[in-house]
Image (cartoon, rainbow, N blue to C red):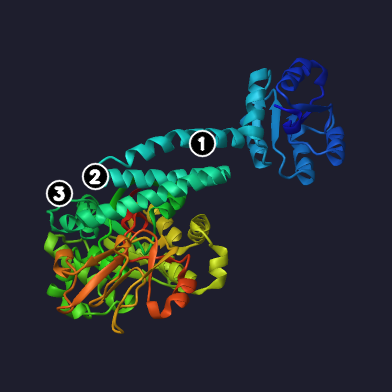
Amino acid sequence: MSNELSKKILWVDDEIELLKSQILFLQQKGYLIETATNGDDALEILKSSPVDLILLDEQMPGKRGIETVGELRKLAPHVPVVMVTKSEEEDLMNQAIGRRVDDYIVKPVNPNQVLSVCKRLLEGSRIRHQRTAQDFVSRFRELEEKRSELFTWKDWAETYTELILWESRLSETGESGLAGLLQGLKRQWRRDFSYYVMKDYYNWISAPRGERPPVSVDVVREFLLPMIRKYETVLFIVVDCMRMDQWFQLAPIIEEFFDIERKTYFSILPTATPYARNAIFSGLFPSEIIERFPQYWQVGSDDEGSLNLYERVLLEAQFSRLGVEPASPLRYEKVFTKEEGQRLVKKVPALLQRGVTALVVNFIDILTHGRSESEILLEIAPNEQAYRDLVLSWFRHSSLLGVLQEAARHGVPVLLTSDHGSVHCTRPVTVYAKRDASTNLRYKFGDNINSDEQQVTFLVRQPDKAKLPYLGMNVHYIFAIEDTYFVYPTKLREYQNRYYGSFLHGGISPEEMILPVALLTPK
């Protein structure tokens, strides 16, 4: 360790002369050591000279170490303090922890023991970051080579999960160069995944269950049904527009009161609420919903509000087809506002008596749509990491967390999932459509709709092959892939500027399609 990077340690002990060999050992490791024999001298030193860590003897004449901690904290609230004591009494340990002591060493101290504590507190972050960077560089080469392999849907799910976990780890290191390298790799994988979906999607939705990846229509049958058969009471939560990376941000909080079994499924197309969430609740593809329940779907509409009014009825119908008879009538709640969430938390004990309660939480979807229209939200969440942080901040104070805590307290298992994700869009693609074409920026349907940029679009000329509603002889569906979004040639500049950098959904990308399913069992 060079002197330029040396950390300064203040060691406070009334028998400091007996610690010369220990001090010399730390100095040989590159640390600067200043000493004091009592608490008052330590405070004077701290007033005149900043230090990076304090080793504090607990039993000293005059002011004890435990008493000194509070005054040290006033002068240097963020400097780590390590208590060194002969006592192993639990009460003293509790006092030390209560006064925010960072670590605790029992005498006689071993030089390597002290070094280990100093390294962890002073250099642990840097060492971990270096290890992360080295591990990523090694793994990066392997991931590059894997791109040439033939992937199954399970391979795609596992690789996407690994990429977003690397993204989280690298963001902590501050390694902008490696983060840029990862972003480049993600773009390549996003392109490969999009081509994979375009090639296999028709096979997915026509294959029998078990011979395809689990998709939206399989969520209830494959994940919820086994829980209903096992437990008297189950809470089923769909968080609208929650991405896999956002789930990983929330999971550590949820793990405090639930054991988590994590699974994955794929959203159908379009990856938008009217299609994907109705498919979850009904267990049917969009064309099948229109065929069986024409009264619940306005043909040719893409309005999310009007097309998701019958989720409870669709879920009841699916339960009936599956032979499910809940212990009590199905309960269904949808939360849009803070006030609705607060009322829901109060109702939870009554909802969790027996049977199945389905809960839809719309905040992340509202945030995603609102961000495209709000300069303030664009400023707060300019990129994916900031967007994840914003979702995490919401969750810490949300009614959803309150509902989960109540479920855990009542011993009620939870199935938590999402209906679709969103992708950070940075590339406009021109689409040609008539005035009556739908308005979504990641998918559209309309009379003879088309685009010259076929490399970044997926055109469905035969809706029945994709199990999409038939809307007329010449009405086609088109999907944006990767990180593109649709613009019209007549409003090119307006749409480019307005929606550049927006988080959008409806199209084909791993961020929109590869989704978390969490089976939560109360601890």
Amino acid under label 2?
Answer: Thr
Badge 1 is on which residue? Answer: 132
Left/right placement of residue 204 relative to residue 24 reads left
Amino acid under label 1?
Answer: Thr
Residue 345 visible in the picture: no
Badge 2 is on which residue? Answer: 152
Q: Where is residue 393 in the image (x, y as percent from the top left)?
A: 53, 59
Residue at disc 1, secondary structure = helix
Foreground: disc 3 or disc 2: 2
Badge 3 is on which residue? Answer: 211
Q: Dots 3 and 2: beta carbons under 8 Å?
A: no
Left/right placement of residue 275 relative to residue 210 reads right
Is the residue marked by circle 3 packed among few (<14), some (14-19), or many (20+) residues within 10 Å? Answer: few
Is the residue marked by circle 2 packed among few (<14), some (14-19), or many (20+) residues within 10 Å? Answer: few
Which of these two is toward me, 178 or 124? Answer: 178
Marked residue nearer the N-terminal end (1 or 3): 1
Q: Position of residue 79 (x, y in %)?
A: 72, 40
Residue at disc 2, secondary structure = loop
Marked residue nearer the N-terminal end (3 or 2): 2
